[in-house]
Amino acid sequence: MTQAPRGETPRADGLQYAYAVVRDTGAPAAALAGVRGVAGEPVRAVVHLGLAVVAGPVPAEQFGEGPLKERLERLEWLERIARAHARVVDAAGAGTGVVPVRLATVCRGEEGLRRMLETGRERFTEALDRLDGRVEWGVKVYAAPPPPAEPTTAPTAAGSGRDYLRRRRAERRASQERWGRSEDGARQVHDALCAHAEQARLHPPQDARLSGTADRNVLNAAYLVPRAESSAFAGRVEELDRRSAGVRLELTGPWVPYSFVAPSGDDTGRAETRRERSGG
Amino acid sequence: MTTSPLAHRQIALVDLLDRLLAGGVVITGDLTLRIADVDLVRIDLRALISSVNENVPSPWEEP
């Protein structure tokens, strides 16, 4: 993608892609120097009411409602903007509290950005206070793969039909037991980790086709942990992985606390999804 | 288990999308769509991801 020529001033009334909100401490400016956004554009902090929204000008041909919708359906483009979005959020949050804005939030002009800070002011301030000094850790629990199948005897031999059915029943029972064990294992892991976290959120288990992992994902959770307790938390995950039979744990992070920007019990996001789904 | 995931590998897209598509502050779309001077464009991608799941062969898997 071609970048804006050096020194070109973006039009103040053009589309602005919003990445994250931080407190207006003057610090973001240095952290954002040289950081490029979803359109390869330089990003900056737009300050209003003691808050700052990190944003960058994006071309309407790509980020207007129609083109954006269409482009987001191309996975390679979605991946590119997702990674760029995360990069900017990470930079904005380096050394300071940061509240990420949902992917693909585009405002019209700097006025739109300021209006966003105005209308969201309480929510942003509440989230900044609550998340300050915290990080998010992701923990996924997978059902351990079943033991290799015993060599099967051909069910075609005379008199083996009953054996075959018996074997199939045994297999089905074993698979149900395994599944039950991994669900119990996932619940125990989750309970144990909740005791070490301020908050927890459950994401839907990942589809094997998207994750590329063959083992069944039985828990896909996020935990909010004080930054200072991160290594203790990671150690606890490692210990649980060793001790839990029948399941396998995977740790990701530390993340900016994306999963915790809404106060617990707030399902605004989900309600909106339902509305948009039914509308479309 | 990877003790320091970030140091060892690129973040998996699927883990990133879990967070980017469900996390982050949602700017109230229904309000802003009616206010011309704010005029936010915000697209929820969860429906898209399920459609990706159902219809499109995953690029990470061998056919």
Image (cartoon, coloured by chain):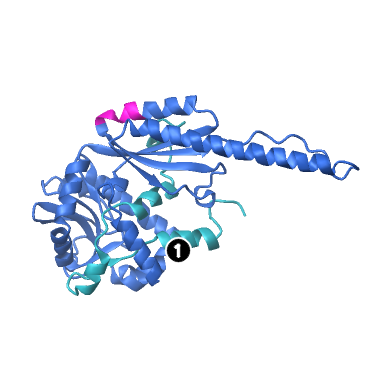
Chain colours: A blue, B cyan
Secondary structure beneath dot 1 equals loop
* Foreground of the two, A138 or A53: A138
**Which residue sits at x=27%, y=59%?**
A41
What chain letter is assigned to the residue under label 1?
Answer: A
Please, what is the three-letter code of the amino acid marked with disc 1?
A: Arg
Q: Dividing the image into 4 quarters, which one contains the N terminus of chain A?
A: bottom left
Residue A173: quarter of image? top right
- Residue B44 colored in magenta in the image: no
- Residue A230 colored in magenta in the image: yes
Q: Which residues are magenta?
A: A228-233
Q: Is residue A245 above or below residue A152?
A: above
- What secondary structure is the stretch in magenta mostly built from? helix
How many discs mark residues in the rendered view? Answer: 1
Count neighbours of disc 1 (C-alpha within 10 A) and say few if under 14, some if 14 to 19, many if 20 or more. Answer: few
**Which residue sits at x=18%, y=53%?**
A123
* Foreground of the two, A70 or A164: A164
Task: Determine whether, in the image, residue A220 is placed left or right of residue A40.
Answer: right
> Taking the image as drawn, is residue B4 in sight?
no
Task: Determine whether, in the image, residue A164 is placed left or right of residue B53.
Answer: right
- Please state the horizontal and vertical placement of residue A146, each as a whole percent of the image: 63, 36
* Foreground of the two, B55 or A77: B55
Residue at the outermost left position: A49
Q: Is residue A110 above or below residue A143?
A: below
- Please state the horizontal and vertical placement of residue A61, each as a whole percent of the image: 32, 72
- Please state the horizontal and vertical placement of residue A74, each as a whole percent of the image: 45, 63
Q: Dividing the image into 4 quarters, which one contains the C terminus of chain A?
A: bottom left
**Which residue sits at x=71%, y=36%?**
A149
Q: Check disc 1 and report the residue beneath it.
A: A74
- Please state the horizontal and vertical placement of residue A183, each as a whole percent of the image: 50, 38
**Which residue sits at x=38%, y=26%?**
A235
> Taking the image as drawn, is residue B17 in sight?
yes
